[in-house]
Image: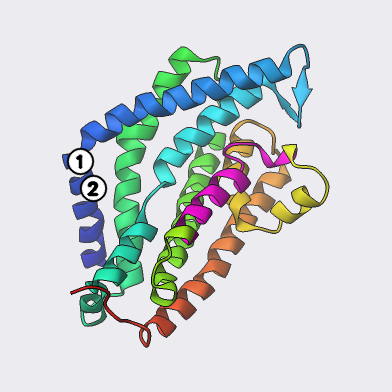
Amino acid sequence: MFSAYLEVVRMRFLMMLAYRVNYYSGILIYALNIGSYYFVYKAIYGEQAMIGGFTLGQMTTYVAISWMGRAFFFNNLDREIASEIRDGSVAIQFIRPYNYVYVKMMQGLGEGIFRLFLFTAPGMVFIWLLLPVELPTDPALWGIYLVMLFFSFLINTQINIITGLCAFFLENNEGLMRMKRVAVDLFSGLIIPITFFKGWSHSLLEWLPFQAITYIPSAVFTGRITGTAVSFNLGVQVVWFLILIIPIYVLWIKSRTRLFVQGG
């Protein structure tokens, strides 16, 4: 059975490879996004040495690594699941000898591996040549970052699967998917590091899973989080991964009694 799931990973990787031109152009688009944020933050900093616990050099690296990390863990599994629910093709998955949720996870992993090697890695080199990005020299830090980035993928994919499975109950969850994407980009620290949020908003974000997607790995990579706090924040990612298994399991079990087909 495990070999079957590995085949799913391989097939999704090959499918993405067939449309790789889209991702080469995506590198340029991401570079423009990162460049725009760099000049915005440079103007905001002005003569200030530090804002929100970040120096300008750390912020530049944070923005670059956050967007390049997003290139790895981003996927549209929520839309795929919702589409399969609406047209009824998901019904076939109920009678096949594998778990539909596991298959979706493996498809996301295949896409993520493709993005990591053909988007994130070359994109990071491209950004490093253009902007004053401060890359760490400690191999151990790169190692822990990659582990955290993998958990970013798992947590983001779990949220996408939860959002997609909601189509069983909402019939049309387009609004929910749009809200989810805005929430992930904003509250994960991709657009604004969560240290920029103050008071109750900062405290609230620390109790949500979004910080485990972008802020935690990027803050570790830039040296914003160091020492024993690194292990603690890795633990936060692991805990959220385990917690999010529960709603996925509940939604999948209940969805078996909710399936109906829209259209012909």
Q: Residues within 10 Å of mark 1 (few under 14, many from 20)?
A: some
Residue 213 appearing in the image: no
Above or below, 218 against 251 in this view is above
Which disc number belongs to residue 161? none
As helix, strand or loop, the secondary structure at mark 2 comes to helix
Which disc number belongs to residue 13? 2
In the rendering, at what x and y percent does residue 122 appear? 35, 26
Q: What residue is shown at x 61% (from left), y 41% (from top)?
A: 189
Q: Residue at the bottom extreme?
A: 257
> Which kind of residue does numbered mark 1 sit on?
Leu
Classify residue 115 as left or right of residue 228: left
Q: Which residues are magenta?
A: 176-195
Query: Magenta stretch: residue 192 in it?
Result: yes
Occupied quadrant, residue 45: top right
Q: What residue is shown at x 61% (from left), y 20% (from top)?
A: 40
Q: Residues within 10 Å of mark 2 (few under 14, many from 20)?
A: many
The residues tagged by marks 2 and 1 sit, at their Cα atoms, a distance apart of: 6 Å
Q: Nearer the viewer, residue 66 or 184?
A: 184
